[in-house]
Amino acid sequence: MANTLSAKKMTRKIAKRTEVNKSRRSRMRTFIRKVEEAIAAGDATAASEALRAAAPVIVRSAQKGIVHKNTAARKVSRLTHRVKALAAPAS
């Protein structure tokens, strides 16, 4: 248990930051899920729109420290690859 005033303040700050980070992470996952659902449904236009909405959210979560920069880039890249494969004619 925190004893000093500064330690008590830090626990309050950490709790507040944790809530914000949880919310941001949840928002990012929701956007990713929408893209994946559109891909699973086979709807190329919906997947493209969902990706266009999701990419900035993923990048912003990296800027805020929710995920690492490379992780965000990897997620966007993989989603983009899957959406493009869906839009391309099957041969």
Image: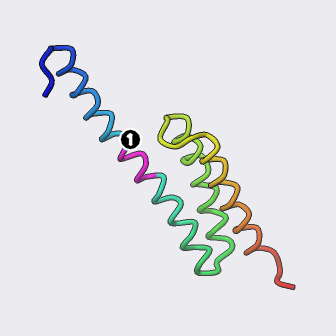
Of 78 and 59, nearer the camera is: 78
Q: Which quadrant is the C terminus positioned in?
A: bottom right
- Kindly give the residue lying farthest to the top in the view shown: 5
In the image, taking residue 45 as reference, residue 84 lies left or right, namely right
Q: Main SS type for the magenta part?
A: helix
In the rendered structure, which segment of residues is drawn in magenta?
22-27
In the image, taking residue 56 as reference, residue 66 lies left or right, namely left
Give the amino acid at mark 1.
Asn
Could you say whether the residue bearing mark 1 is in a helix, strand or loop?
helix
Image location (x, y in percent) of residue 37: 54, 73
Q: Which quadrant is the N terminus positioned in?
A: top left
Of 85 and 48, nearer the camera is: 85
Image point (73%, 75%), residue name: 86
Which quarter of the figure has residue 5? top left
Q: Is 1 one of the magenta-colored residues?
A: no
Mark 1 sits on what residue? Answer: 21
Image point (54%, 47%), residue name: 57
Position of residue 32 relative to residue 18, above or below, is below
- Kindly give the residue lying farthest to the bottom in the view shown: 91
Of 67 and 50, nearer the camera is: 67
Image point (42%, 45%), residue name: 24
